[in-house]
């Protein structure tokens, strides 16, 4: 879920938690841009699939801070790094990038 620009960082993790309450959901990925300077992402999973913390670390540690536990994790990525990777940092471009990264990573590591 793309929250766009946000002021309250805790909304990201709260909504990621809520996403796991939907029947059949294996992964919940929520992100938003805080103060226009950082992309903050929370990831949750059922714990029966690849570790959320390890996955975020593998995907984003070189461009920000990322990690967590088996069923929950967080990444904080400077928007300057996002721009280097995807160019235009429109809401749609960021959403497409994250969707592509997660679909590829979770398909390979299911």
Image (spheres, rainbow, N blue to C red):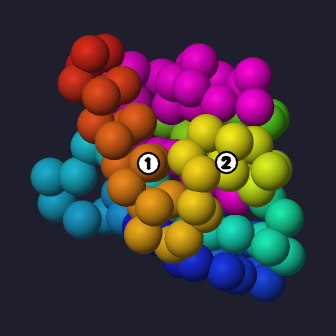
Tell me if mark 1 has few (under 14), some (14-19) or many (20+) residues whose alpha carbon lies within 10 angstroms of its own.
some
Q: Residue at x 70, y 69 (%)?
A: 33
Query: What is the number of callouts on the image?
Result: 2
Residue 93 image position (x, y, % from top left): 45, 61
Residue 102 image position (x, y, % from top left): 38, 37
Query: What is the secondary structure assignment of the residue under circle 1?
Result: helix
The answer to whether residue 29 is left or right of residue 88 is left
Q: Which residues are magenta?
A: 39-63
Q: Quadrant of the N terminus?
A: bottom left
Which residue position holds label 2?
82
Residue 52 visible within the image? yes
Tell me whether the residue at label 1 lies in contact with that at label 2, contact meaning CB atoms closer than 8 angstroms.
yes
Which residue position holds label 1?
97
Magenta stretch: includes residue 92? no
Q: Residue at x 37, y 55 (%)?
A: 96
Residue 103 image position (x, y, % from top left): 28, 37
Question: As rendered, which of 110 and 99 lies closer to the eye?
Answer: 99
Q: Residue at x 42, y 69 (%)?
A: 92
Answer with the quarter of the image where residue 56 lies.
top right
Magenta stretch: includes residue 59? yes
């Amino acid at each position: 879920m793309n929250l766009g620009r946000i002021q309250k960082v805790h909304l990201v993790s709260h909504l990621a938690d809520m996403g796991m309450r939907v029947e059949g959901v294996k992964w919940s990925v929520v992100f938003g841009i805080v103060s226009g300077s950082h992309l903050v992402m929370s990831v949750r999973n059922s714990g029966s699939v690849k570790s959320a913390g390890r996955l975020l670390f593998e995907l984003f540690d070189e461009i920000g801070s990322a990690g967590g536990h088996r069923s929950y994790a967080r990444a904080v990525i400077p928007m300057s790094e996002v721009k280097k990777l995807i160019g235009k940092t429109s809401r749609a471009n960021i959403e497409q990038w994250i969707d592509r990264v997660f679909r590829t990573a979770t398909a390979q590591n299911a």
